Structures are given as structure tokens and as C-alpha cells.
Amino acid sequence: MRVTVGQGYDETVTRVRELLADAGFGVLTEIDMAATLQAKLGVQVAPRIILGACRPELAQQALSVDPRVATLLPCNVVISVEDDGSVVEVFDPAVMTDFSPVLDDVAGEARARLSVMMDALTNDQKDRDATRA
């Protein structure tokens, strides 16, 4: 799941956090890839952050159906910079059903909630474009 928006990186990170919260997800982990690669390898890369998003109710449901799903939790949301704006990518929870078909209901709900977040980012962009026109 991927969307590109014309917003700046910092603004996009803030907006994604807000929309994740609106969708019932909390951010459990945060990895600043640019800072980590700079500190560990002395390499400079464009800004990129990985947010580990979790909705505890869905995580508990998934774990009760198939405890092996823990290897796929939390759901990663990546925000990065590209030439045409900020890119938001989300690990598609539907992939969990390839791992374990009994996770279909949980994966479907997680995907629906994350799709709402991605749609809101797209609508934010459309609203900005309409304002400029």
C-alpha cells in the first residue's frame, strides 16, 4: 500500500501519526533510518522513518488465532522523501492470510483501517491541490 503526497517530510510524519491514531493504531516503535545509518555506518541517506503501528485488539485477536503471526507484528508504516514529495508505504495486512489463512478476518479489519488512513492522506493532497487551483 503506497501513496505519494506533496507535503514535506516532517508534515507528513505528523499527519500519518494523527491518522494512525484516528484509525485506532498506536506507534510502538520508531526507527529513524537516516539517523541510524549515519550513526552506525557514516552513510547519509534521505529522510526515512519506520513507524511500528499496532492496534492491540487486532494483535490479540491475531495471536489467539495463530501465535506465529507475532513475527509480522507490528505493522510497519514507512515515510520517506522522493523527488515529487513524501511517500507513505504500509505493509499490507492482507499478506498475513498467505502466512495463515485463518487470519483473514483480522487482516481484513487491519487493512480496512489502514486504507482509511491512506485515503485520508490522498484526500489531504486533493484538498491542497484544489485550494491552489
Image (tube, rainbow, N blue to C red):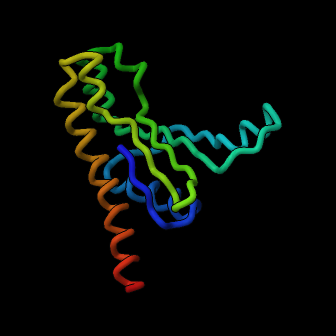
Seen at 52% across and 61% down, the residue is 85
Q: With 7 as the anchor, is 45 left or right in this view?
A: right
Quadrant hosting residue 108: top left
Q: Quadrant of the N terminus?
A: top left
At 26% across and 19% down in the image, what residue appears? 98
Camera-side residue: 66 or 78? 78
Residue 19 at x, y percent in the picture: 38, 57
Task: Tell me if residue 33 comes above or below residue 8 in the rendering.
Answer: above
Residue 71: image quadrant is top left
Nearest the camera: 42 or 11? 42
Q: Which residue lies most toward the right here?
A: 42
Count of marks, rendered view: 0
The residue drawn where x is 54% and y is 41% is 50
- Name the residue nearer the viewer: 37 or 64: 37
- Image quadrant where residue 82 sits: bottom right
| Up-down relation of residue 67 to residue 130 (above or below) | above
Q: Residue at x 44, y 62 (%)?
A: 5
- Where is residue 11 shown, x and y percent of the image? 54, 65
Instruction: Tell which of 80 and 101 is nearer to you.
Output: 80
